[in-house]
Image (tube, rainbow, N blue to C red):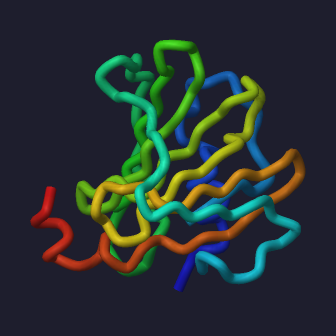
Amino acid sequence: MRKPWVSLLLGGWLALLALPAPPASAQAVPASVGAGSEGGGSIERRAEGFDIPTLARSKFLGWVRRDISDRVPGEETLFKQYADEWGFQFETVSINGIVFAINIDVDGKYPFDITLLDTDCDSVFETKVEDKPGQRTDLSIPECVFRPAAADKR
């Protein structure tokens, strides 16, 4: 069962309290890919995946753990926030050490504009959700992050 505030967390709200961004109303978040969206943005899929920010050239800003799933006890989800070499902010979202979502801010205004999702835990982010201001698209946390075999792939 998904907690009602999962959308807020995966979209970046509370990801880092130290950042000066105002809280978002709900943002792109990992319920069902391809399912209906609530006035949501475009969902694009590419088998070869989308380009992702380079962590090695990005400045680490901080992290926070949150409990967004009833399937794992405690605060199982790790949000790490970064600024890339051009100053854009992004965050990685992981469970069991598997990064399954990357939220990217391209316009310098909160909330995040783009979410890249790895739906099968193969480190290829094949789903891209781009929300326009005031839009929200709900996506689900991939099942593979909860499987022990997936956690062993790290």
Q: In screen coordinates, is 39 left or right of 64?
A: right
Q: In screen coordinates, is 88 left or right of 59?
A: right
From this view, report whether residue 140 is shown above or below residue 137: below
Residue closer to the observer: 11 or 46: 46
Residue visible at 77% across and 52% down? 131
Residue closer to the observer: 141 or 86: 86
x, y percent for residue 126: 47, 60
x, y percent for residue 118: 42, 61
Give the total number of marks visible in the rendering: 0
Q: In screen coordinates, is 47 left or right of 29?
A: left
Q: In screen coordinates, is 147 left or right of 9?
A: left
- Residue that extends furthest to the top in the rendered view of this protein: 86
From this view, report whether residue 116 is shown above or below residue 60: below
From this view, report whether residue 129 is shown above or below residue 4: above
Q: Quadrant of residue 149?
A: bottom left
Residue closer to the observer: 128 or 32: 128
Residue visible at 29% across and 76% down? 146
Residue visible at 54% across and 74% down? 140
Q: Quadrant of residue 3?
A: bottom right
x, y percent for residue 130: 71, 51
- Residue that extends furthest to the left in the rendered view of this protein: 152
Residue visible at 79% across and 59% down? 41
x, y percent for residue 72: 32, 74
Q: What quarter of the picture does the C terminus occupy?
A: bottom left
